[in-house]
Amino acid sequence: MSGHSKWATTKHKKAVIDAKRAKSFAKLIKNIEVAARMGGPDLAGNPGLELAVTKAKKTSVPNDNIDRAIKRGAGLTGEVVDYTEIMYEARGPQGSALLIECLTDNKNRAASEVRLAISRNGGTIADPGSVSYLFTRKGVVNLPKNGLSEDDVLMAVLDAGAEEVKDSGENWEVHSEPTDLQAIRDALKEAGIEYETDEAEFIPSMQVDLDLDGAKKFMRLVDALEDLDDVQNVYTNADMSEEVQAALEAAE
């Protein structure tokens, strides 16, 4: 889930090491297959594939799985890979907004499962456009602070197209246009600065603070959506205070 708040960052770190690792692998493999299908199996000539493979390796997806996905996506195994991207819009507790990004080979199945997960967990499907206007597509690079100041990061990435550097607790977030992600990554490498994640994400223009009851309901909704095989990402404008986050973790 992406919400660009301190608790979303914490949740992301937990997700890497918990039982969702296999689910994460499957989604990364799907991205590789789609990129190979669209641009061919050569990483040097297919930036989208190179990015998908880099992300998979950062999450420790085995090389054999990556190689098979490239071949399968490029049609070198005789299998047909045909995924469709779909975006669903929803409302969650206390006026929060969600964008649910799906990549599926069966649109009817995806629609049915997403609607069921939303309705069973206190959300409502929103009309197209009624939620998406609250978000803007941006490139987002997360990097650990490790003693780096905001100025240190800004100096490294400003000429590469960075628009701003934001404080997200333990990490810095570099925001840019999605097309500048590669330049941002290159600039960080040149400066010797390690980063954790780099994605084209939907950033909310404003955030909605949840109280403890709303946060509990919201997390149930997001967990149900992220458990679906066809759901690649869930973006939200929901946020919570450190006090609410601590109370939520204590209740687990």
Image (cartoon, helix red, strand yellow):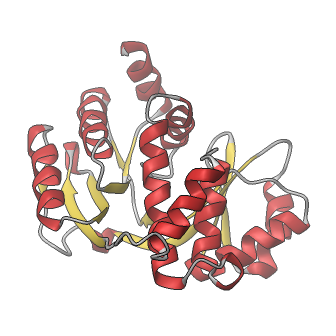
- Where residue 82 sits, quadrant-wise, is bottom left
Q: In this view, does 39 lie above or below 122?
A: below
- Where residue 206 sits, quadrant-wise, is bottom left
Give the residue drawn at x 83%, y 42%.
146
Q: In this view, does 186 lie above or below 252?
A: below
Residue 140 seen in this snapshot: no
Residue 46 seen in this snapshot: yes
Could you tell me residue 87's position as x and y percent? 26, 68
Residue placed most toward the observer, 125 or 205? 125
Could you tell me residue 160's position as x and y percent? 77, 79
Q: Quadrant of the C terminus?
A: top left
Q: In this view, does 243 lie above or below 204?
A: above
Q: Residue furthest right?
A: 191
Tally of numbered tags: 0
Give the residue drawn at x 62%, y 46%.
62
Give the residue drawn at x 55%, y 42%.
9
Could you tell me residue 250's position as x and y percent? 43, 14
Q: Is residue 174 left or right of residue 234?
A: right
Q: Residue furthest front?
A: 78
Q: In this view, does 142 lie to the left or right of 122?
A: right
Could you tell me residue 89's position as x and y percent? 21, 63
